[in-house]
Image: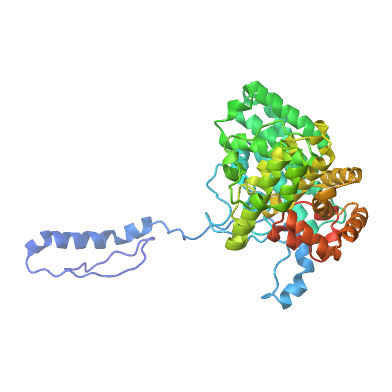
Amino acid sequence: MSDPHPQPKSKNSTNASLSFINISTPEDTQAPSTRRAIHQHAMRDIGLSRRKPRKKRGATDIPLDLTHLHSVMHAQTTQTHCHASSISLSVSVSPYQPLGLGQGEIDPFLPYPVPLTPSVRELVAHIFRDDALGCLRALRDDWFPVGLSSSVAFQLVLSNSAMSLAYLRVKSGGGETGMEVGDSERSLKHLGHAIRGLSSELADEKFRGSDEAVGAVAGFLCHDAAVGQLDSWLKHREGLKSVLEFRGGIEAISSNKSLRTTISWVELRGAYTWDLVPHFPLPPTWPSLSHYLSPPHPNAPSSTHPILAICKQILNPSSPFLPIFSALIDLSASTSAASAAQGPAFWASATDAGGWPGALAHRLLSWRPLDAGAPSSQIEECARLACLLYIAPVWRKFGTGPVLTGALAEKLVARLRGVKEWGALWELQVWGLVMAGRRGGNIGEIGVWLKEVGRERGLRGCEGVLEVARRVVWIGDVFDGLLGGGFWDVDDADEGFI
């Protein structure tokens, strides 16, 4: 059966054709299969005209803002064109390429309190960088959620990330000559947003007593420590104490683990920078990161350590230095063993800053041997400062940055001048001089001291000095890499994010 007079094509018709249906009797036209075929043929053009085009499926690219790096990239263009397959990008060039949705370092499904512009995406990606140049992963699992709690706190997180990128750019020669890390344009922009945002939020009484307010003030503490602004840091610490008192004390926020840990961490970082006594205790969960701080095992390295044995003979048996030094020996040995077994992954996978360096730093900063007035207090103070300087490169290796040591090194050198006789603890003196010399300040004076001690003790040059230092306490993967060519030429610019 067919239509001998087909209608002209409609405007929406896509194909003019005839369809033939064979039947044997007139009753066959009522068969379900025949009726369905006739209906499909009649409605085909109408159905096609109503169909919507399908969307192409694929990954959503997340572009990154690299405009501030164009000058550096331009300088590398010729070299990269000739050797594109063999040259690694400078640290001043972002290693992050456009990412598919849900891939890479950025989780697009988190409730970010600010719009994710390309620049913000790059700064967030830098925070979650876990390679050798990643310096913001320490306690990241705690402070990043605090940063997400409010736009003010997150602007400070972005400001600190921008400072880190600026530091890497300056180190690679891509920044302006003499530019301070805190002068990064992006860092200052986000800092300004945070200051204006906090001023606005503090007008709300509900905000002043909230976790978000505590996190925001803690963010300013972190920023002040990173750029070395002591006066501002002290004011913000008092502000943080006021906010916590308004809440009923630091114990009132213990249920918020991330916030509680962040408070202790940011205060510890500033207290370390300027050798101040911490006002906040370590959070209850933190000592669990440093279970080694319990009394040493009978077979621990410290049990047979000759220099520790001499310290026990000379110093007061109740001296806090003895358990601290014992823990430092055992923790360094266990860290060296883990590093040898696991390789670089041991350091890159840690997000707790190693745990024990922070716990020991808190104990060292809280202990003030000069207050006791004991005969050995000058030597103990030198040892305390040297231990704090020892922690700095360990922290950096665990992804902590910046770790500023200028004030500690200056204090140690001043104390070393005041100790005229070390006696049987002369090896501790050599180790302290090496720790002070790492900073690079007063290197001429330190070199003279080391030569004098070397002549008295029959040490053979620099290698003899380092052999003594290794006998005191040492982590090869941390310090050996810092003692190559130019070890004694470290300057202020070399101290910071790595």
Q: Residue furthest bottom?
A: 82
Q: Classify 278 as above or below 416.
A: above
Residue 155: give x, y in percent of width and height: 68, 41
Drawn side of residue 256 relative to residue 496, left or right: left
Residue 328: give x, y in percent of width and height: 68, 48
In front: 472, or 106?
Answer: 472
- Residue 65 visible, this orientation: yes
Q: Quarter holding the C terminus?
A: bottom right
Q: Classify 355 as above or below 256.
A: below
Q: How many marks?
A: 0
- Which quadrant holds residue 367? top right
Residue 96: give x, y in percent of width and height: 64, 60
- Residue 498 visible, this orientation: no
Drawn side of residue 50 relative to residue 413, left or right: left
In front: 185, or 397?
Answer: 397
Q: Quarter holding the N terminus?
A: bottom left
In front: 355, or 195?
Answer: 355
- Which quadrant holds residue 223? top right
Q: Classify 152 as above or below 497.
A: above
Image point (77%, 57%), residue name = 469
Q: Classify 15 as above or below 410.
A: below
Q: Residue furthest front?
A: 313
Looking at the image, what colour scheme do you see?
Answer: rainbow
Residue 185: give x, y in percent of width and height: 78, 48
